Image (cartoon, helix red, strand yellow):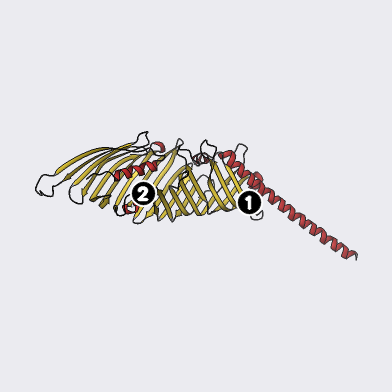
Amino acid sequence: MTGGHRGRSLVLVLLLLSVLAVFGFWEIRHSFEKNLRTDLVRIVRQAYEGQAEIGSVHLNLLTGNVRFRNVRFRFPLGQSGEYRTLFDFPGVDGHLSLLSLLTRVYDFRELTFLAPSVTGVMRDDGSDNYRQFFEKWREGVQTPHGGGAVVRSFRIRKGRVSWGIVGKPPVVEMREISGRVTSNPLMNRFQVRFSSPGLELRKAGGGVVLDAVRFSGSIEKGSLRDFRLGLSMRPSWFRVQGNVTQIQNVPFLDVFFHGTVGLSGLEPLLGGRTGDYSGVLLADGYIHGPAAQWEGNLRVNGSRVRIASHSYRKVFLKARFSSVSLDVHPFSAVLAKGGKMSATLIASLSTPNPVARLTVRQTRIPPLFPGGEPLEMSVGRDIPLSPKTSVVEEWIELANRLMGVPVS
């Protein structure tokens, strides 16, 4: 009897210790999960002046696996006091170094973002919800009371990125993004790769959809090195490559591009009726200089081109451009119905009263007098433009206005 009683007592003690161990383990895990949620919210608030919302956190103390659900980061939209969601993460799975739980400088060895979305918006006054965050992130801002988080690599599955004006449909939207970012052991160089089967550019009345987007490059000390960007929209394809380096904390561009542009695919952006644009242009050039004062060169060739109501057997264009100006000299074309045309264009953008100066010279042989002297005509015109909230909108409006100018 005594031996049986002692056996039952031992079982009860072991059972009680097991319950206490499970309860203690649960409390420790719950405490770490609470700290993780609280610290991440504090980092976003203090370091980036934003708001964070984390639906749930689940941490496995045996393997270091961590799972977040319904994570949202919001940032101020100018001085209005309004916050807009920039990052929305329905699910994030990853692996966390358990030792970092004690220092509360969380070391995420790898994260996988499931169906994430990045939504950048801008107001008419130029304020936005993304510029301040990315500037602080690039500078490596730390929280006032220490702590932080380190992400050594991450994956994206079925992501979405969009940008547009508040209250309007997105101007640019990229869907079904997949990719990966990895770092070296010193965390000072990152390799980036991603691809997307669809990128849509919209404007009032229509838009165009690219068939594929691919990007690769390395990020080091705020510089983007040896990057390659490929865009495809049959029959168009485009390749952009080069470097964006930091020189005295100022981004410096050294970018080359080459590809073909099928005009029929751009009809929704350029406006007009179906069939107004046809032909393929071969384009190549480069952009060089500081980010705020970059300049570029462009060279374009094409044959059997139709633009609006005009058809050309051959076109050639050479231009210098920047974010605030465009200087086309020369533009030459052989008209499909005979004759030649040349033109120059000087456009000033991003000014209180943007305007483009177009000069056209055209030579024709009178159809009733085949042996007569060619007729030459010269026309100059100022094309006023309305101020826009973005460089993209300024260039689109300039293209639309030029397409509608009669030159023959």
Task: Depth check: give the residue in front, 27 or 386.
Answer: 386
To which quarter of the image does residue 81 belong? Answer: top right
Disc 1 marks which amino acid? Val
**Mark 1 or mark 2: which is in front?**
2
Q: Earlier in the sequence, mark 1 or mark 2?
A: 1
Instruction: Say which quadrant the C terminus sits in.
Output: top left
| Nearer-the-camera pick, 368 or 95 | 368
Q: Is residue 268 visible?
A: yes
Label 2 Cα neighbours within 10 Å, binned few <14 / some 14-19 / many ≥20? some
Which disc is residue 44 wearing? none
Residue at the image point whose x is 17% and y is 44% from the top: 363
What residue sits right under mark 2 in the picture? 269
Q: Secondary structure at mark 1?
A: strand
- Whether tag 1 and tag 2 are in contact, CB under 8 A, the answer is no
Q: Is residue 266 visible?
A: no
Secondary structure beneath dot 2 equals: helix
x and y, in percent, of residue 348 in the image: 33, 36
- Residue 213, x across and y down, in percent: 42, 53
Q: Which residue is mark 1?
A: 57
Which residue is at the front of the view, 143 or 46?
Answer: 46
User: The disc labelled 2 sits on which kind of residue?
Assistant: Leu
Q: Image point 57% across, 46% down: which residue? A: 150
The reply, left or right, for residue 165 in relation to residue 284 is: right
Quadrant for residue 124, please give it: top left
Residue lying furthest left: 371
Q: Residues within 10 Å of mark 1 (few under 14, many from 20)?
A: some
Judged left or right of residue 15, residue 293 is left
- Which corner quadrant holds the N terminus? bottom right
Could you tell me which residue is drawn at 45 percent across and 54 percent down?
Answer: 195
In this view, which residue lies farthest toward the top? 352
Q: CA distance from mark 1 to mark 2?
A: 45 Å
Q: Is residue 17 above or below residue 189?
A: below
